[in-house]
Image: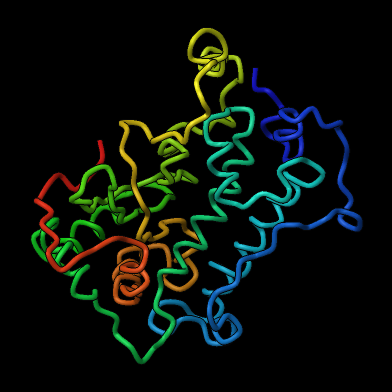
Amino acid sequence: MIIRTLLRRPGAIQSRTAAPARSFSPAIARYIHRRATLANHEQLSKNGIPGLFSPKGFSIAYDQYQQHITDELNATTSGTPFENKDVKDLVIEWSRNPTTAYGFNVASMAYNNHFFFSGISKDPNVQSTPPSELATAINNNFSSFESLREEFLATADAMFGPGFVWLVQTNDTSLRPLRILPTYLAGTPISGAHYRRQSHDLNTHSAESFQQLNNVGTFGQAAKQDNRPKKPLGGIDVVPLLCVSTWEHAWLHDYGVKGKSKYLQAWWNKIDWNTVSSLGQFTKSDQSVQVNKFFT
């Protein structure tokens, strides 16, 4: 039997914090989290992102959706100890607990969607190209810039269903190689969240099916260990640099049912590579060797 608290916005989180059940009135609810704004946001809302989103397309993909998911996050956290926490911290904290699946989903989508739009160049007069240090790392890891483009867009186009495709940099070796990482639905690449790719939607499973996992470390020597930052599955620490959304709300209005490939190609031409470079660590003498492009 499906546990109903997983399907209700406030109840999913309150059940973990022992908060009393209550209903929320829009008139009195506190809205701690606010929709993240983008640089030149007023201009984007008026003009869209030329070459990628029409004004209406931008409104749907960012303004309306980001507001919707922020409202859901507020409804989920209002009146709980989580209402003042940063969205990224919520993604990490809720990622391994099946009883907070709904909270994880909305927090992760708020983070992912904003990250996606933050990596888009908003200047229609500038064609962004990778800075030299980043270009060197791309050539060392993917043979060429064009090879990265082909692999990345092919991965995104092949995704049957919504999600995100990420360019990430691994930090577990001095070489810091680059990887392509797909995540599905509201899955996240954030290391502390254990690469929750959301291959199974926990809202469709019972809490009992995860009970043994929930008790790991509760007793014995493991319970005495410090609460150290956790690495993702496989022990690899990564930093997200770039992502594209394959969710239909991002492209359906401007590109139509058969327009996903055209949307992805348009997005690639609007990447803000300076922002991508600023999120990673690159040097002119980058000596990364070519390796597999995907996490398995």
Q: Quadrant of residue 269?
A: bottom left
Residue found 61% across the figure and 66% down from its top: 36
The image shows residue 77, relative to residue 223, as above or below, that is: below
Foreground pick, 259 / 223? 223
Residue found 60% across the figure and 20% down from its top: 206
Residue found 48% across the figure and 32% down from its top: 228
Spot occupied by residue 107 in the image (x, y as percentages of width and height): 59, 48
Residue found 60% across the figure and 72% down from its top: 37
From this viewpoint, which residue is outermost toward the bottom?
Answer: 125
The image shows residue 178, relative to residue 201, as above or below, that is: below
Q: Say whether residue 288 is left or right of residue 76.
A: left
Quadrant in which the C terminus appears? top left
Q: Say whether residue 213 is left or right of residue 295.
A: right
Foreground pick, 262 / 211? 211
Foreground pick, 275 / 211? 275
Spot occupied by residue 136 in the image (x, y as percentages of width and height): 14, 67
Spot occupied by residue 248 in the image (x, y as percentages of width and height): 47, 58
Q: Say whether residue 152 is left or right of residue 241.
A: left
Q: Quadrant of residue 90?
A: top right
